[in-house]
Amino acid sequence: DTGVSQDPRHKITKRGQNVTFRCDPISEHNRLYWYRQTLGQGPEFLTYFQNEAQLEKSRLLSDRFSAERPKGSFSTLEIQRTEQGDSAMYLCASSTWLAEDYEQYFGPGTRLTVT
Amino acid sequence: AQSVSQHNHHVILSEAASLELGCNYSYGGTVNLFWYVQYPGQHLQLLLKYFSGDPLVKGIKGFEAEFIKSKFSFNLRKPSVQWSDTAEYFCASDTGGFKTIFGAGTRLFVKA
């Protein structure tokens, strides 16, 4: 399967712990996006990368959240000092980009439960 | 601020019924519009997209959507639904290719 992959698929952690998620995009895609989705809502944009550069961060992404894409390939999303409100599905997507045509391909997500 | 509203959170239809899911976006400038679908247990995937040109867009699996600029709408339609169309449908927009804003989603259940 050459789609977007995410690891782990599920993570249960205690409040106050740090967690890190990984996303492997489709290999030829230079754009990578992170979203958060809570129950009953659509995905909320968190941040995106073009190659290794992080070009936009949502104000939803507090200073406890950090994302990296060090070599322009895979990306990690770290949440420090997790809170119960961080419980959500974290989605990664990737795309190529042409101003007039693009499509984001989504991964299966990482479901985070903070107890 | 850019936003997307979906009119119905839950829709129940019988097979062969026609479907129309409402979507309105708020941005007054140039927007790109999308419908995504998430089948049970599967990833989000693109149904169709509008960037420019013909405002009637055809997508996969017999779905289509019409962009009506004057109404800020991008409603999704299908003339005859099947049980396999049971899924959650998300309307989304962006203004330049990165910050995509999604609606809250509509859960469609099709009775066999």
Image (cartoon, rainbow, N blue to C red):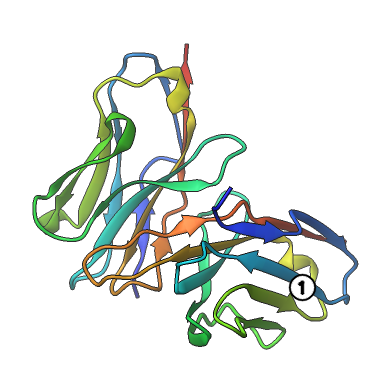
In the displayed orientation, state which residue is furthest to the top: B112
- Answer left or right for B88 relative to B20: right
x 88%, y 77%: residue: A16
x 74%, y 77%: residue: A79
Quarter of the image where one finds residue A24: bottom right
Above or below, comparing residue A34 to residue B12 in the picture: below
x 54%, y 53%: residue: A3
Percent of width and height locating residue A114 = 83, 63
- Answer left or right for A29 relative to A103: right
Question: Which quadrant of the rendered structure holds the N terminus of chain B?
Answer: bottom left
Mark 1, secondary structure of its residue: strand
Above or below, comparing residue A16 to residue B9 in the picture: below
Percent of width and height locating residue B40 = 58, 34
Percent of width and height locating residue A102 = 32, 62
Above or below, comparing residue A93 to residue A54 in the picture: above
Percent of width and height locating residue B23 = 30, 49
Circle 1 Cα neighbour tier, 10 Å, few/some/many (<14 / 14–19 / ≥20): some
Residue identified by numbered label 1:
A20
Give the total number of marks visible in the rendering. Answer: 1
Quarter of the image where one finds residue A98: bottom left
Quarter of the image where one finds residue A83: bottom right
Above or below, comparing residue A26 to residue B105 in the picture: below
What kind of residue is marked 1?
Answer: Thr
Q: Label 1 marks which chain's residue? A: A
